[in-house]
Image (spheres, rainbow, N blue to C red):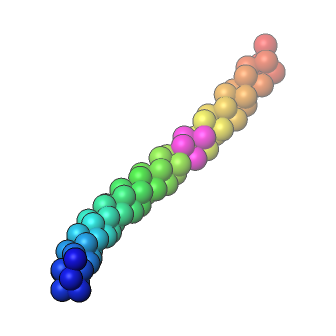
């Protein structure tokens, strides 16, 4: 193999490598975007869970108060 052929071979390999790296960068960006979206959904779900827990606690307190009042009235 001549030096020119060696250079051409390396140039082709470099072109393939560059294309592969660009594809991988695109895939990585897609994964990052999906992870960010999932994190946002998780945050929203956690907010809903926290709100439901507070509401449940409030209902429990009201039920306890009603049960106490009922016992006292009997």
Q: Could you tell me which residue is drawn at 18 percent across and 86 percent down?
A: 4
Give the extent of the magenta segment. 49-53
For the point 54% across and 43% down, which residue is it?
49
Which quarter of the rendered picture does the C terminus lie within?
top right
Q: Nearer the viewer, residue 47 or 65?
A: 47
Task: Spot the residue most to the front.
Answer: 1
Q: Is residue 3 magenta?
A: no
Say if 54 sits above or below 60 in the image.
below
Q: Note whether 10 is above or below 58 in the view shown.
A: below
Residue 71 versus residue 43: which sits nearer the camera?
Answer: 43
Q: Is residue 56 left or right of residue 18?
A: right
Residue 52 position, x and y percent, is 54, 40
Residue in the picture at 73% in, 22% down: 67
In x, y percent, where is residue 14? 26, 76
Can see residue 12? yes
Left or right of 48 in this view: 60: right
| Residue 26 in sight here | no
Residue at left 52%, top 51%? 47
Quarter of the image where one finds residue 66 = top right
- Counting from the top left corner in percent of width and height, residue 60 is at 67, 32
Q: Quarter-wise, where is residue 20 in the image?
A: bottom left
Which sits in the foreground, 38 or 71?
Answer: 38
Locate residue 50, reporting x and y percent. Answer: 58, 47
């Amino acid at each position: 193999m001549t030096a020119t052929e060696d250079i051409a071979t390396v140039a082709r390999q470099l072109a393939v490598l560059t294309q592969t790296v660009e594809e991988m960068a695109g895939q990585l960006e897609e994964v990052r975007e999906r992870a960010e979206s999932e994190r946002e959904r998780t945050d929203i779900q956690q907010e809903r869970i926290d709100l439901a827990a507070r509401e449940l606690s409030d209902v429990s307190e009201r039920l306890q108060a009603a049960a106490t009042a009922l016992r006292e009235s009997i």
